[in-house]
Image: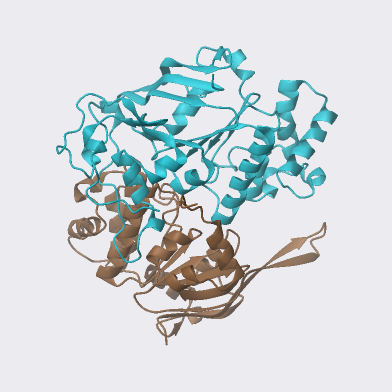
Chain colours: A cyan, B brown
């Protein structure tokens, strides 16, 4: 049995424009120590998937319509808010994209860093402070005993993200959810933060759910990748398979649109059109209007395509249109 | 003589410290930058955060006065102009910012945003509707949406509006400060294609600032690498990418996440 088993998760938002099915039947497992990636464009439902697990969806307008999330003997979707509070920040840690807005600017790092220990482990302040300093040292903050008494604005963006990682891991969670943790950072800092997450994960055996839209980052950190489009997974595969033998038209299109993969001087490949408006409901294959294979030869699935296992552990939405061989060959790397 | 020449451009910031404010520390944000850009060229400017890229761009835009050195555009020293004259010249320099959500006025329709930009160059132009429609078509937006507000557009469309606004004043130089970093990959490509196409059609001169070397390699003719206020390497995009000389360029290149399964 996996550490976390999510089955048929459905989250929707009831808005004035209609019901937006932001997450529409998503299932995946997270094994202990594994890094699972969720990739997709903005608005595809990546973050909503993870926030649903932690009860962080604003209700209303949000509503979890169904599914279950087995975490040990708990179903995270059924837990009361008070029980959930014992899981969130204790057994499941969370880091966000923007380290500036996720730290409280009025409180010293020390106050914020020992808070999870005081709440979840009931240790004394002195003890908590000692552990917090050790944790800061582990994430590579120089002179931690002194720096812990600084305010967030006294740290650079990369250092703040290190503090966030220290804060998320200080309670030794079994799972760390990282929501675009490096998107706001520049390349060299991104490299350091990715290496740090990998290093801490190895030391602590934490499983990581990594949310990002950057395929290159995914290829470096993840063991298993779920590609999300319009609230559903269109393809799921071990990372190597996903990049060497992608099957779904959307996965292939995403890979082709990375600027670094293209020859200078040529027009960059772009995916035509826009993601569907989820408020008006999607019938049939959600990617059909944007698929470069065309919409009728072979035809796209008329019902909503289901995931089918095409190779061991490699799942892809069973839509003939999207699975057809690409007209232009994808450049192999 | 090049189109735009920066010679020994320097900007220091001094900060008072201590209880009495009697100690000062000096930050050399831009420290002796010499660069030239030809008309119709795209120059990529890369470096880590804090290396002085933004200060340099503000110096070029005449938003900051240099401590020493000069900015010469088409043979004219910009520092010699009066402040009133500078303000008139500002339409010659346009910026495109990273965050299209924050850089458009939420209370102005697309029409009024673009009409304002056009009228700085042509104050008495009749038939402004036509000019706005033309501008919108040029950046790939449907002119029918001209009466909408920024929040009604997606991130990629908003960045197109920001580009249209920059083009509206018929600038001599465009400074694009991380114009695609906040966008999804597929949208990034659309905006890069648009900038490239506009360069071909209008002969734009542009400085493209980014920390993402792979994007810069694609769009720029030459790349300048900046570190601690200095330009440490300048070269043709492909040769710098393939054979970096300075340590900083090597470091930036090695930090790019790569998709590599040939291992």
A239 vs A286, nearest the viewer:
A239
Going 25% across and 37% down the picture, which residue do you hit? A322
Residue farthest along the right direction in this orientation: A126
Report the number of discs: 0
Residue A104, can we see it? no
Q: Residue A171: x and y, percent?
A: 70, 28
Q: Is residue A121 left or right of residue B148?
A: right
Looking at the rendered image, the quarter that the N terminus of chain A falls into is: top right
- Residue B69, image quadrant: bottom right
Residue farthest along the left direction in this orientation: A296
- Residue A133, image quadrant: top right
Q: Residue A149: x and y, percent?
A: 78, 42
Q: Is residue B181 above or below residue B12?
A: above
Residue farthest along the bottom direction in this orientation: B1
B101 vs A306, nearest the viewer:
A306
A9 vs A2, nearest the viewer:
A2
Residue A203, can we see it? yes
Q: Is residue B11 left or right of residue B200?
A: right
B234 vs A297, nearest the viewer:
A297
Going 50% across and 21% down the picture, which residue do you hit? A5
Going 53% across and 71% down the picture, which residue do you hit? B244
Q: Is residue A60 above or below residue B140?
A: above
Going 50% across and 16% down the picture, which residue do you hit? A77
Q: Residue A316: x and y, percent?
A: 34, 32
Q: Residue A304: x and y, percent?
A: 26, 25
Q: Is residue A262 left or right of residue A143?
A: left
């Amino acid at each position: 049995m996996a550490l976390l088993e999510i089955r048929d998760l459905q989250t929707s938002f009831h808005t004035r424009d209609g019901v937006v099915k932001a997450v529409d039947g998503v299932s995946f497992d997270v094994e202990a120590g594994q890094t699972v990636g969720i990739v997709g464009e903005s608005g595809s439902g990546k973050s909503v998937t993870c926030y649903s697990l932690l009860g962080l969806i604003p209700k209303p307008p949000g509503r979890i319509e169904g599914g279950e999330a087995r975490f040990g003997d708990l179903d995270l979707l059924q837990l009361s808010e008070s029980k959930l509070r014992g899981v969130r920040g204790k057994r499941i840690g969370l880091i966000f994209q923007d380290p500036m807005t996720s730290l409280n600017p009025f409180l010293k790092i020390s106050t914020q860093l020992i808070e999870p220990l005081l709440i979840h482990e009931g240790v004394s302040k002195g003890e908590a402070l000692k552990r917090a300093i050790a944790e800061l040292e582990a994430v590579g903050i120089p002179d931690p005993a002194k720096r812990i008494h600084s305010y967030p604005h006294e740290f650079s963006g990369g250092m703040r993200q290190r503090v966030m990682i220290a804060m998320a891991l200080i309670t030794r969670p079994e799972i760390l959810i990282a929501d675009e943790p490096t998107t706001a950072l520049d390349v060299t800092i991104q490299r350091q933060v990715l290496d740090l997450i990998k290093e801490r994960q190895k030391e602590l055996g934490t499983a990581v759910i990594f949310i990002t839209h950057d395929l290159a980052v995914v290829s470096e950190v993840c063991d298993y990748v779920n590609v999300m489009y319009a609230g559903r997974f269109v393809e799921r595969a071990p990372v190597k398979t996903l990049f060497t033998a992608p099957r779904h038209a959307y996965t292939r299109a995403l890979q082709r649109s990375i600027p670094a993969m293209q020859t200078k001087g040529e027009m960059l490949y772009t995916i035509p059109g826009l993601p569907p408006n989820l408020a008006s409901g999607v019938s049939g294959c959600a990617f059909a209007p944007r698929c470069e294979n065309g919409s009728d030869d072979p035809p796209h699935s008329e019902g909503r395509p289901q995931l089918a296992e095409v190779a061991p552990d490699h799942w892809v939405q069973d839509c003939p249109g999207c699975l057809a061989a690409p007209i232009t060959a994808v450049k192999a790397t | 003589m090049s189109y735009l020449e920066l010679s020994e451009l320097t900007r220091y910031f001094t900060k008072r410290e201590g209880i009495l404010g009697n100690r000062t520390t000096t930050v050399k944000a831009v420290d002796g930058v010499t660069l030239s850009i030809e008309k119709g060229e795209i120059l990529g400017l890369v470096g880590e955060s804090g290396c002085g890229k933004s200060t340099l761009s503000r110096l070029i835009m005449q938003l900051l006065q240099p401590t020493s050195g000069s900015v010469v555009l088409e043979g004219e020293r910009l520092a010699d102009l009066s402040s009133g004259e500078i303000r008139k010249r500002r339409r010659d320099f346009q910026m495109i910012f990273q965050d299209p959500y924050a850089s458009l006025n939420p209370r102005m329709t697309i029409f009024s945003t673009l009409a304002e930009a056009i009228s700085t160059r042509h104050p008495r132009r009749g038939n402004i509707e036509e000019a706005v429609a033309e501008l919108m078509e040029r950046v790939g937006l449907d002119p029918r949406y001209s009466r909408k507000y920024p929040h009604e557009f997606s991130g990629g469309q908003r960045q197109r509006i920001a580009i249209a606004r920059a083009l509206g004043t018929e600038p001599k130089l465009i400074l694009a400060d991380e114009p695609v970093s906040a966008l999804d990959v597929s949208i990034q490509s659309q905006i890069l294609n648009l900038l490239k196409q506009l360069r071909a059609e209008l002969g734009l001169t542009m400085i493209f600032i980014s920390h993402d070397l792979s994007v810069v390699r694609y769009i720029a003719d030459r790349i300048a690498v900046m570190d601690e206020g200095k330009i440490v390497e300048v070269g043709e995009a492909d040769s710098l990418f393939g054979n970096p000389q300075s340590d900083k360029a090597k470091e930036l290149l090695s930090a790019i996440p790569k998709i590599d399964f040939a291992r």
